[in-house]
């Protein structure tokens, strides 16, 4: 009996750890697509800004500041994208990292019976990045979204 209990406990622990940080088979999900442009405070496009969400692949803005971002998420009406200048002054300045909640609208309905809940879209998103001031102290990365 003790052996059975030990095996049962070990199996339960193993199952718990193997499912950590993994998307569960059968979890609902949506795909999303966001089109937009990143500009500075004067309306000039910014090239080379990293655009990302969670663990998705990083996209970069082109020379006109435009980006297209594709991702996967739990079903929601908002996606959070982060915009970060990682090249220093190579793109004409240094800019403060910012995150933004973006409202997405259903583009393609998903399956009512299945886990795929549809494709969502946001277009013409404009992101204004503030220039870092030389005397600006770095802010702690609190995970909060600047207003």
Image (cartoon, helix red, strand yellow):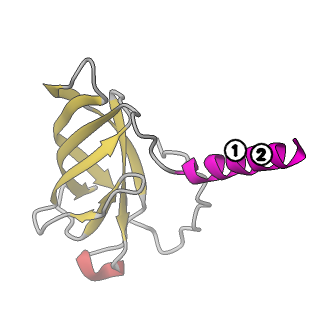
Q: Quadrant of the N terminus?
A: top right
Crowding near the residue tagged with mark 1, few <14, some 14–19, many ≥20 C-alpha atoms within 10 Å: few
Q: Is residue 42 visible?
A: no
Which region shows up in magenta?
A: 1-21
Which one is in front, 21 or 52? 21
Q: Is residue 4 visible?
A: yes
In the structure shown, which secondary structural element does the residue marked by tag 1 occupy? helix
- Mark 1–mark 2 contact, CB under 8 Å? yes
Measuring from the top left, give residue 6's x and y in whole percent.
82, 49
In the image, is 48 to the left or to the right of 100? left
Q: Report the residue at 35% width, 38% height from top.
A: 79
Q: Let me know if residue 80 is in the magenta part.
A: no
* Image: 57 above or below 116: below
Kindly give the residue lying farthest to the right in the view shown: 2
Kindly identify which residue carries mark 1.
12
Measuring from the top left, give residue 50's x and y in whole percent.
31, 65
Which one is in front, 34 or 40? 34
């Amino acid at each position: 009996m003790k052996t059975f209990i030990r095996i049962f406990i070990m199996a339960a622990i193993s199952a718990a750890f193997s499912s950590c940080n993994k998307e569960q088979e059968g979890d609902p999900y949506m795909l999303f697509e966001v089109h937009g442009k990143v500009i500075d405070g004067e309306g000039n496009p910014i090239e080379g800004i990293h655009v990302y969400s969670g663990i998705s692949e990083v996209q970069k803005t082109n020379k006109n500041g435009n980006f297209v971002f594709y991702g996967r998420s739990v079903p929601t009406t908002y996606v959070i994208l982060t915009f970060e200048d990682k090249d220093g002054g190579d793109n004409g300045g240094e800019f403060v990292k910012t995150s933004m909640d973006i409202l997405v609208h259903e583009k393609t309905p998903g399956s009512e019976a299945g886990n795929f809940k549809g494709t969502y879209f946001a277009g013409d998103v404009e992101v204004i990045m503030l220039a870092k001031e030389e005397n600006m102290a770095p802010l702690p990365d609190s995970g909060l979204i600047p207003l």
